[in-house]
């Protein structure tokens, strides 16, 4: 049986959500030796993706990056609709899709799952697995899993509410900046998709986490927010910039960070300095740094450039070349690929370029799906 008092004490500490979840996992497996896996899956925009994973049987799976479209006829929508738990005493009795086979092949035999609801919508799913058949059949164990699910829901909602006011304010700032920016909303959406796709493809090679992908998906579109402060005669120019005009345009990176700092300044100190806002400012400030050190605003080189900025730069240039702009016509895909390859190691991180070129059809699909 779980130690409810110890769990309640943990919840009262103001730690990061992932630290709390790690503590809950350790309490759970110490209480129940048969528990083999604990995961929290985020539900957003009809996508399900790992947020937190702890697998007792295969430790390497703790870093598993899993994302898929939610099948309207699948198990997740049914659980969300029922708003209740689902107990599976034998996973082999389920439809043997790739996910079920993954769990079975790693030694998991039964499961308990529960939707985490907030204001009528599912924000996440929590899954517990056991290495034994019928592990969750006992009523007392089901009650303990429901208690853990309730605590996890409270943690997720607390995190969501803590950040929602900043997120709303940032979204308003992005909309205001975009109202003046000549680039399209399609470009912003494609940036989000390209960047998260690149991060996912680079995950093993670069040690990228679930949280990194969530952040780059959330913040890639903010890369040019500083253009809001660029004078119209420069921002909307159809001619080649003079050296003086180019210097003014290049200031948009620092202007963008100033805008974000201005938004964050309205919120308590313990919120405005969290790691993900440093991540956001890295994207804005450094997405024009070149891999060889000849970019701006700081002339950073190679791995000194934050990885999130290196990814966003590749996504931004790829989309800009494919798209019509005030100062240019759209390029054909062959010319775009040649340019990206020719500048690998010069402007771009070679690993990012290799992932882009090796998976080119997926990026072209994104461009076509959200074309202007």
Image (tube, rainbow, N blue to C red):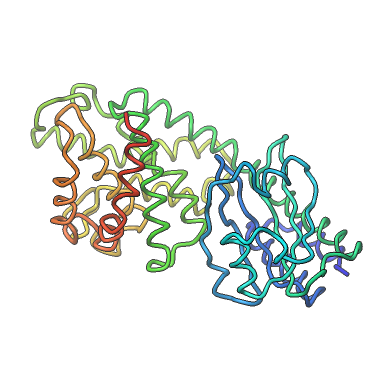
Closer to the camera in the image, 336 or 166: 336
Tell me if 369 is positioned left or right of 108 in this view: left
Which quadrant would the N terminus be assigned to in this image?
A: bottom right
Q: Where is residue 119 in the image (x, y as percent from the top left)?
A: 72, 35
Residue 352 at what x, y percent from top left? 29, 58
Of residues 10 and 204, the one nearer the viewer is: 204
Place residue 341 in its image quadrant: bottom left
Task: Name the residue: 50% across, 38% down.
Answer: 265
Return the residue nearer the eye: 17 or 248: 17
Q: In this view, does 212 lie above or below 187?
A: below
Residue 223 higher or lower than 156, as above or below: above
Q: Where is residue 218 in the image (x, y as percent from the top left)?
A: 47, 44
Q: How many marks?
A: 0
> Left of 42 or right of it: where is 256?
left
Residue at horizontal 48%, vertical 35%?
Answer: 170
The location of residue 71, given as percent across then percent down, is 59, 45
Q: Which residue lies furthest to the right in this view?
A: 139
Q: Quadrant of residue 109?
A: bottom right
Residue 23 lies left or right of residue 216; in this view the side is: right
For residue 345, what is the image quadrant? bottom left
Name the quadrant of the C terminus.
top left
């Amino acid at each position: 049986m779980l130690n409810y008092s110890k769990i309640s004490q943990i919840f009262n500490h103001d730690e990061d959500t992932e630290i709390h979840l790690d503590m809950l996992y350790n309490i759970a497996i110490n209480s129940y030796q048969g528990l083999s896996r604990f995961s929290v899956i985020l539900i957003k925009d009809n996508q399900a993706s790992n947020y937190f994973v702890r697998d007792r049987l295969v430790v390497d799976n703790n870093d598993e990056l899993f994302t898929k479209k939610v099948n309207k006829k699948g198990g997740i929508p049914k659980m969300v609709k029922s708003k209740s738990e689902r107990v599976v005493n034998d996973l082999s009795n389920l439809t043997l899709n790739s996910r079920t086979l993954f769990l079975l092949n790693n030694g998991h035999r039964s499961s308990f799952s529960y939707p985490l609801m907030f204001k009528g919508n599912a924000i996440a799913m929590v899954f517990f697995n056991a290495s034994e058949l019928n592990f969750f059949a006992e009523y007392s164990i089901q009650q303990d899993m429901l208690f853990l699910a309730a605590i996890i829901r409270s943690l997720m909602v607390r995190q969501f509410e803590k950040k929602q006011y900043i997120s709303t304010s940032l979204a308003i700032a992005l909309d205001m900046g975009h109202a003046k920016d000549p680039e399209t909303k399609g470009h912003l959406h494609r940036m989000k998709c390209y960047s998260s796709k690149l991060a996912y493809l680079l995950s093993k090679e670069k040690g990228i986490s679930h949280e990194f992908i969530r952040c780059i998906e959330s913040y890639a579109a903010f890369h040019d927010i500083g253009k809001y402060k660029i004078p119209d005669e420069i921002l909307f120019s159809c001619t080649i910039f003079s050296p003086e005009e180019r210097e003014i345009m290049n200031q948009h990176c620092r202007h963008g960070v100033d805008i974000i700092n201005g938004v964050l300044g309205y919120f308590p100190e313990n919120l405005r300095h969290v790691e993900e806002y440093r991540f956001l400012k890295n994207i804005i400030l450094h997405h024009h740094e070149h891999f060889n050190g000849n970019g701006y605003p700081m002339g950073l080189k190679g791995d000194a450039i934050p990885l999130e900025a290196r990814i966003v730069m590749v996504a931004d240039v790829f989309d800009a070349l494919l798209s019509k702009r005030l100062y240019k016509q759209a390029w054909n895909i062959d010319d775009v690929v040649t340019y990206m390859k020719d500048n690998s190691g010069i402007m771009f991180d070679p690993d990012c370029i290799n992932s882009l070129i090796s998976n080119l059809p997926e990026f072209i699909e994104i461009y076509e799906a959200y074309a202007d």
